[in-house]
Amino acid sequence: MPGGRRGPSRQQLSRSALPSLQTLVGGNLSNGSGLRNRSSNLVGLSAPPLSALITPEPVRHSRIPELPLDSSLLFEFMLFLYLLVALFVQYINIYRTVWWYPYSHPAASTSLNFHLMDYHLAVFITVMLARRLVWTIVSEVSQSSGGSLLRYVVLIAARLSLLTMCGWVLCWTLVNLCKNHSVLNLLFLGYPFGVYVPLCCFHQEGAKSQTAQVDCDYPADHQQTDLTEAPLFRPRDFLFLLRENLREQFTSPPHMPTHSCPPHTHSHTPELIRAEVEELKSDFNRRIKEVLFNSLFSAYYVAFLPLCFVKSTQYYDMRWSCEHLIMVWINAFVMLMSQLLPPSYCDLLHRSAAHLGRWQKLEHGSYSNAPQHMWSESTIWPQGVLVRHSRSLYKAVGPYNVALPSDVSHARFYFLFHKPLRILNLLIWIESSVVLYQLYSLLRSERWNHTLSLGLILICNYYVLFKLLRDRIVLGKAYSYPLSSNSLGLKSQ
């Protein structure tokens, strides 16, 4: 009413009537963080750290069973067998004939135009596709220890004989291809290597020096190489690169990195978690690069290179050949992903992402009356806390947050791996789409070569899809199983 006594406004009540968290605990935070009012001024005296006032929710991990994984030798043999089938299918699509015509027709005497095929090219492609299988056999032989001196000499002789035979066959095919084809066609033979070598010679190295010891089982020389300060792009000597790759092929493969949940009381726990995430990111990127290169390499030599050596007067179905190229690349990609990113490795990434957490960037002016803290790298932040970092406001999303708010790679790492079945679901979706499309094409196919091609490729795809669905069913039940009270806490179960 006019002239009457007015009560306190809503803004005054929000400022004075309601006590803040700083008033309850008694002042400023001792770890360098503080509370901010709307005027962004620090007030109050010293107080215990935030981690001592608000305990973050413990990270709980599910226990997954040990799923069977193909050995390296078996997987390389299965991949090589699939690529041979795909190469045979491509040759059927290119050199097929109408073999049901009368035998008086010269092109109908056989089902394929064998006289138009270049056998040297087929042998060269087969040797290139078998390179991983050969390296795996040589590595398995090199790693076998024990036995008598005679057994050791026999293994060394067998290894040298295998490498010599592969090198001799490769040189023999290259010499015959150089005699019968132009220089332009010969350039297609080594195009993937011309792309791969610059990627390895001019690569980006980490410029950040990490001093904390990481709880990952990595070789010492690998950590020293990644943790030394270097320019952004540094050319590496080609001979040194070749010698290093050969040494890695003959030495034992790197072990699977391990993860153990850090305790609450460790003073350097956030630094250790961030360092572990950096190592896992480097290892994951290396595996993805290997998957992409080998899948593209396989699709190039299986489906694209035979098209480059077809005579200009010969007709073939370009659409079907290009479709086969895409299918081979997708199937090789899924097979390599399922082998190089097994369920145990994805679970390791998921556990590390659960400890890393994520920050959500908020707009300026939002949550102006809520307590806001200055982000500290040595603090474990609980869910829902507001922090200021680099003149921006962030909100903790995960139950356990030690990530750098402004680091996009940390947010991407959490998005990819905070759900342990995300990668597996993606692979199942891709492979299921390919199988359904091939079944649809098989029902509508009217040519004998299409029916035979789809039937052979579908047999291989069924095996890959079966393994993915088996892992999905088992892991889905394992991750949905309710955790007991004994699993509470930060120690890995």
Image: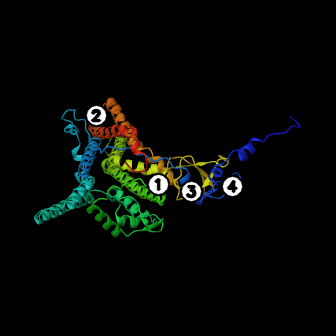
Q: CA distance from mark 2 to mark 3?
A: 70 Å
Q: Residue at x 31, y 30 (%)?
A: 446
The chosen color scheme is rainbow
Rendered location of residue 449, percent (x, y): 27, 36
Name the mark nearer the viewer: 2 or 4: 4
Rendered location of residue 470, percent (x, y): 31, 38
Q: Are marks 2 and 3 in contact (CB under 8 Å)?
A: no
Q: Are marks 4 and 1 in contact (CB under 8 Å)?
A: no
**Which comes sooner in the sequence, label 3 or label 4?**
4
**Which comes sooner in the sequence, label 4 or label 1?**
4
Amino acid at the residue labelled 2? Thr
Amino acid at the residue labelled 3? Pro
Q: On the image, numbered disc 2 is attached to which residue?
A: 451
Foreground: 425 or 201? 425
Foreground: 142 or 445? 142
Q: On the image, numbered disc 3 is attached to which residue?
A: 49
Q: On the image, numbered disc 1 is attached to which residue?
A: 264
Amino acid at the residue labelled 4? Ser
Q: CA distance from mark 2 to mark 1?
A: 61 Å
Question: Few, some or many C-alpha atoms within 10 Å of disc 4 (few <14, some 14-19, many ≥20)?
Answer: few
Q: Residue at x 45, y 46 (%)?
A: 418
Q: Are marks 2 and 4 in contact (CB under 8 Å)?
A: no
- Callout 3: helix, strand or loop? loop
Q: CA distance from mark 2 to mark 4?
A: 72 Å
- Callout 2: helix, strand or loop? helix
Name the disc covering residue 41, or none.
Answer: none
Name the mark nearer the viewer: 3 or 4: 3
